[in-house]
Each structure stands twice: as structure tokens, then as C-alpha cells.
Amino acid sequence: MSTSPQATPGNATGYGDAAGRAAAETSPWKTGFVVFAGTIMIVAGVFQALAGLVALFRNEVYVVGLNYVFSFDVITWGWIHLIIGIVVAVAGAAVLTGQLWGRVFGVGIAAVSMLTNFMFIPYYPVWSLLIIALDVFVIWALCTYTRDRSEAVTR
């Protein structure tokens, strides 16, 4: 009988140590989803910043609805989207570089982006709902990813 870690009885994965079990549990899909989430954060952040610039300089593009609870001036929405867009893009870059603070901050700023776009639905409904859906995916991808497991795969 062999004494190698692969021959450990009762271990279905063939690995005898914790790193091996973590490698077997980690799916390359999770790592890919985080890279996709970081990329989506950068792209959506740039687009959101551009939407903010449009609201600042050409505010007649957006239709202002009547009697909505969150009725701000379009120029105010422009500043809000510009700032949030820049912050989302920076957090996406931090996620792509593998920074823990980027993932934590990314979850928070994606939630803020969701709330902001929810309030912006009357002005630009399709875009706002698309960004909300992408933010849900980004939060899911950042919350399910664990760095220790992905490092175990690459060893």
C-alpha cells in the first residue's frame, strides 16, 4: 500500500492535504467570473461616467418625469453618475489586480450603484435596469470568490 497523499483512504479527490482539497473544490469558473466582474465594473463605470457627462452638458437628452419621489435636477444626477462611475471603474481595476480591498469596496459600490440606478429609472429606464442586473452579478461574483482557493489551483 502506498503512503502518497493521493492514496489516502476515504479521500475522493485524491488529495490528502487542505490545499489539495481546496484546489479540488475551486472551479475555474469562479476565477473567471471575478475577472469578468472586474471587467464589467470598469466598462460599466466608464459608461456611467459618460452618462453623467451627458447629463451635465446635454441634459435635454434625459426626459424628466412628473411627480417622482426621487426627482433631482438632471445636472445633479449627472454629478452623481459621474462620481459613482469613476469610483466603480477604480474598484474594478482593483478587483482585476487581485486586491482584497477592491473586492470588498466593489461589493459596496455596486450596491450604491444599484440604488442610484433604481432612483434613475424614470429618466433612463432600460439603461438603469441593465446596470442593476449587472451590479447583482458583480456582487454575486465578488462574494463567492475566495482568493485562497484560486491560489491553491495555480500551485
Image: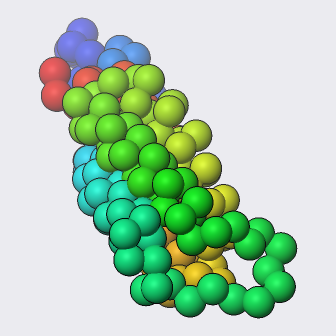
Residue closer to the observer: 75 or 81: 75
Residue 153, above or below 42: above
Residue 85, above or below 18: below
Residue closer to the observer: 149 or 15: 149
User: Residue sitting at 37 percent across and 46 percent down?
Assistant: 86
* Position of residue 153 in the picture relative to residue 95 (left or right): left
Q: Furthest-left residue in view?
A: 155
Residue 35 appears in the rendering:
yes
Residue closer to the observer: 153 or 82: 82
User: Which quarter of the figure has residue 114?
Assistant: bottom right
* Position of residue 122 in the picture relative to residue 92 (left or right): right
Residue 132, above or below 16: below
* Position of residue 115 in the picture relative to residue 33 (left or right): right
Residue 29 appears in the rendering:
no
User: Residue sitting at 29 percent across and 57 percent down?
Assistant: 46
- At which x and y percent is residue 8? 34, 20
User: Residue sitting at 42 percent across and 54 percent down?
Assistant: 82
Quadrant showing the N terminus: top left
- At which x and y percent is residue 107? 53, 42
User: Residue sitting at 21 percent across and 13 percent down?
Assistant: 4
Quadrant showing the C terminus: top left
Q: How is the image coloured?
A: rainbow
- At which x and y percent is residue 118? 66, 70
